[in-house]
Image (cartoon, rainbow, N blue to C red):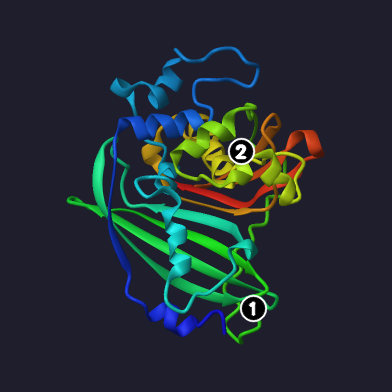
Amino acid sequence: MPIDAARALAADPRQGEIGWDHKDVQLYHLGLGAGSSLHGNSLATDPDELRYTLESKLHVLPSFATVAGAGMAMLGGLAAPGIEVNLANVLHGGHSIELHRPIPVKGRATSSSKVAAVYDKGKAAVIVLRSEVADADGPLWTSDAQIFVRGEGGFGGDRGPSVREELPDRAPNRTEERLIREEQALLYRLSGDWNPLHADPEFAKLAGFDKPILHGLCSYGMTLKAVVDTVLGGDVSRVRAYRTRFAGIVFPGETLRIRMWQEPGRVLVSVTAAERGDAPVLADTVVEHA
C-alpha cells in the first residue's frame, strides 16, 4: 500500500532547530496586508498597525507559527516512513495551532515533527502532520496540518473525528471585509511557501485556474488578524488556539468577507469571497481565547 499507517505512526519524530527575528515577523505581517486598509487609505502610521510593522512596538500574530523557521518544511513529513504519495494528489485540507504562550519577536527553538494520525476517508486519506515547538523556556506551540491525499483511502483505517462547526442561527456579531492586494501572494510567498501556483500564471492554468490563487495559510492569517484587531482588542496574547478547514479558493484582487460570532471563550468565523457570491474560503473556523 502507498500508505502504511502503522509504520508512519511508529516512526521517530524528526528533530530540527528553527530560528526567527523581527524581520521574519514583519515580513509575515506585511504579507497578510498589515499597514493597508480595505479602501486603500494608508494606515502605515496607525498605532494599531505599527504593532505589526515597527520593530520597537512589535507583537507576533499567533499564526506566524505556520511559517516560523522552517515555514512549509512541515510538508517534509510526507516523506516519512510508510508514506509514499503522489504530491499532485495532495491538498492542504485544514490547519490548527495551539499556543502554549505568546510567540517572542526573536527566538531559537527545537521543532519535533511527526505523523500524528492517518485517517481513511474512503476515496482519500487524511494525514495529520504535527509539529511541536519549544525553546529554552518550554513549549511554545503545537501545529497540526491536515493533508488530504486523493485516491489513497480505502485501506480500512479509522475515518477520524468530525470537526464540523455549526454556525449560530443568528446574525454575526461582526462582519469585516479585507481586500487582498494584487501583489499580496507574491509578498506572502517570501515567508516560505514557494509553490508556483501562487505566482506563475502558466502553472496556475495547468492546475485549472485562470490565474494564481492566494495561499490558504495567507487567508488563515488575515482572518486571525481581523479577529484579534476587532474582537480581542488587538491583544495577540489572548489567543489560545485557532483552527480552520480550507473550503475554497480566493484570488488576489478579491475581498475576504469575515463573519464572526462571539461565544464564551471563543469566536466562530465564516470566511467567503465577497465578489463571487460569498463562495466559501474558510469553514469550521474557531478562535479560542482567554
Which residue is located at x 42 percent, y 37 percent? 61
Q: Which residue is the extreme one toward the front?
A: 202
Name the one closer to the observer, 54 or 176: 54
Residue 20 in view here: yes
- Residue density around tag 2, few if under 14, some if 14–19, many if 20 or more, within 10 Å: many
Amino acid identity at mark 1: Gly
- Distance of label 2 from label 1 (alpha carbons): 31 Å
Residue 96, above or below 227: below
Name the one closer to the observer, 235 or 62: 62
Which residue is located at x 58 percent, y 63 percent? 87
**Which mark is on residue 193?**
none
Amino acid identity at mark 2: Ala
Helix, strand or loop at label 2? It is loop
- The residue tagged 2 is 199
- On the image, the x and y values in percent for residue 181 come to 62, 26
Q: Earlier in the sequence, mark 2 or mark 1?
A: 1
Which residue is located at x 59 percent, y 50 percent? 285
Which residue is located at x 29 percent, y 21 percent? 56
**Which mark is on residue 153?**
1
Residue 282, above or below 116: above
- On the image, the x and y values in percent for residue 1 come to 57, 85
- Residue density around tag 1, few if under 14, some if 14–19, many if 20 or more, within 10 Å: many
